Image (spheres, helix red, strand yellow):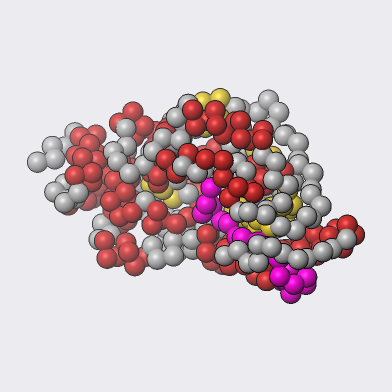
């Protein structure tokens, strides 16, 4: 919610500089690992974004092109915006099962580590509101609006301008001392705070992320074709997963971490300190069969306040069916697939029948 779009706050240059420092320190106390400040000039990012859209790399994510210039011109989205306060929060759960072991065990379900705990949107949004309240207590009413991946905002280019990292070849933000396992959130504000310097690109000649992608989604350095990306296929795509990508999905049932797992900068990454991001319901170590046999009531109960709800129950079963088609041909796998072979959803049935075919088992 934006408050007082016509702020009457009148601070000197020195007062604004002091306020910026105070905001950053308060952000750390609120649980962020870093807070930076950017201006609203995204002209370079706008050109790259429009080219990306023109090539259709956004797939069915029509919302990416729905808002005109609002995504690339913050002042068009929120009138009066002159600065963006960008914050990052580490999320890799320190008490989760070993990711590589789970990913290499094709009987296990692999869920991107950002999604095994509480929905990050809620956590970051709450902290950013607390930060805004703190600023208000310091200077009085001012114009602001909180965003956490919930509106037409180019969060990574803004975070780059705010000094939180550079955008790597896999298109994720990388910090030289913290890797890339972190969430981003923003405060759009009318306060003319001093801005931070961007961090230079340090990817160098490394192409590890490009080479490891199971579906070849990073079609060029810094260019992601979402239509090929496992995160898109298992979360954003609502229909049938193209057969050409199903084997590459492996046991990944919600998102994919491969390009970040091989990034050498993540040797500097820190585990998240938020208990909210700790795994729930053994989602970091559950078997494919166990999750596939959740009925809709159980799924609804165990995905409350979880990013997993983005895929929906049908999408959940669709993804698990694909993963089960890629798993070993064991009796429990075949039996589980047969239990869903007559599912009311045509989408689920189609993927279950494909999975059974991979085990050379007739679906009838």
**Which residue is depicted at the point 53% across and 59% down?**
120
Using the image as rendered, state which of residue 58 and residue 348 is in the foreground: 58
Q: Is residue 97 above or below residue 173?
A: below
**Which residue is depicted at the point 66% across and 35% down?**
43
Q: Answer whether residue 203 is visible to the viewer in this image.
A: yes
The image shows residue 234 at horizontal and vertical percentages of 38, 44
Using the image as rendered, state which of residue 269 and residue 240 is in the foreground: 240
The image shows residue 66 at horizontal and vertical percentages of 46, 42
**Which residue is depicted at the point 13% across and 37% down?**
362
Q: Is residue 131 above or below residue 164?
A: below
Q: Answer whether residue 328 is visible to the viewer in this image.
A: no
Using the image as rendered, state which of residue 294 and residue 141 is in the foreground: 141
Residue at far right of view: 14
The image shows residue 48 at horizontal and vertical percentages of 60, 31
The answer to if 140 sits in the magenta stretch is: yes
Identify the magenta region: 134-152
- Quarter of the image holding residue 237? top left
**Which residue is depicted at the point 49% across and 63% down?**
118
């Amino acid at each position: 919610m934006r408050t007082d779009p016509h702020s009457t706050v009148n601070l000197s240059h020195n007062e604004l500089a002091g306020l910026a420092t105070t905001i950053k320190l308060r952000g750390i106390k609120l649980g962020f690992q870093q807070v930076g400040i950017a201006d609203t000039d995204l002209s370079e990012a706008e050109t790259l974004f429009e080219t990306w859209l023109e090539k259709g790399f956004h797939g069915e994510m029509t919302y990416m092109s729905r808002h005109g210039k609002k995504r690339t011109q913050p002042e068009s989205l929120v009138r009066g915006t002159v600065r963006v306060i960008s914050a990052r929060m580490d999320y890799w759960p320190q008490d989760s099962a070993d990711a590589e072991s789970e990913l290499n065990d094709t009987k296990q379900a692999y869920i991107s580590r950002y999604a095994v705990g509480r929905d990050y949107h809620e956590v970051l949004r709450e902290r950013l509101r607390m930060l805004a309240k703190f600023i208000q207590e310091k200077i009085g009413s001012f114009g602001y609006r909180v965003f956490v991946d919930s509106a037409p905002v180019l969060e990574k280019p803004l975070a780059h301008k705010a000094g939180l990292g550079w955008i790597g070849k896999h298109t994720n933000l990388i910090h030289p001392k913290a890797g890339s396992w972190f969430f981003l959130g923003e405060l759009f504000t009318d306060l003319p705070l001093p801005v931070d310097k961007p961090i230079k690109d340090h990817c160098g000649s490394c192409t590890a992320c490009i080479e490891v992608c199971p579906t070849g989604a990073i079609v060029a350095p810094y260019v992601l074709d979402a239509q090929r990306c496992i995160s898109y296929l298992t979360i954003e795509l609502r229909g049938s997963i193209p057969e050409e990508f199903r084997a590459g999905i492996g046991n990944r049932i919600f998102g994919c971490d491969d390009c970040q797992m091989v990034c050498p900068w993540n040797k500097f990454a820190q585990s998240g300190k938020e208990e909210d991001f700790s795994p729930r319901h053994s989602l970091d170590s559950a078997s494919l069969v166990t999750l596939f046999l959740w009925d809709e009531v159980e799924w609804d109960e165990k995905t409350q306040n979880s990013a997993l709800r983005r895929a929906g129950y049908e999408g959940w079963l669709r993804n698990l069916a694909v993963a089960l088609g890629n798993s070993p041909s064991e009796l429990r796998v075949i039996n589980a697939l047969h239990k869903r072979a007559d599912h009311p959803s045509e989408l689920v049935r189609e993927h279950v029948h494909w999975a059974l075919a991979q085990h050379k088992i007739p679906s009838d």
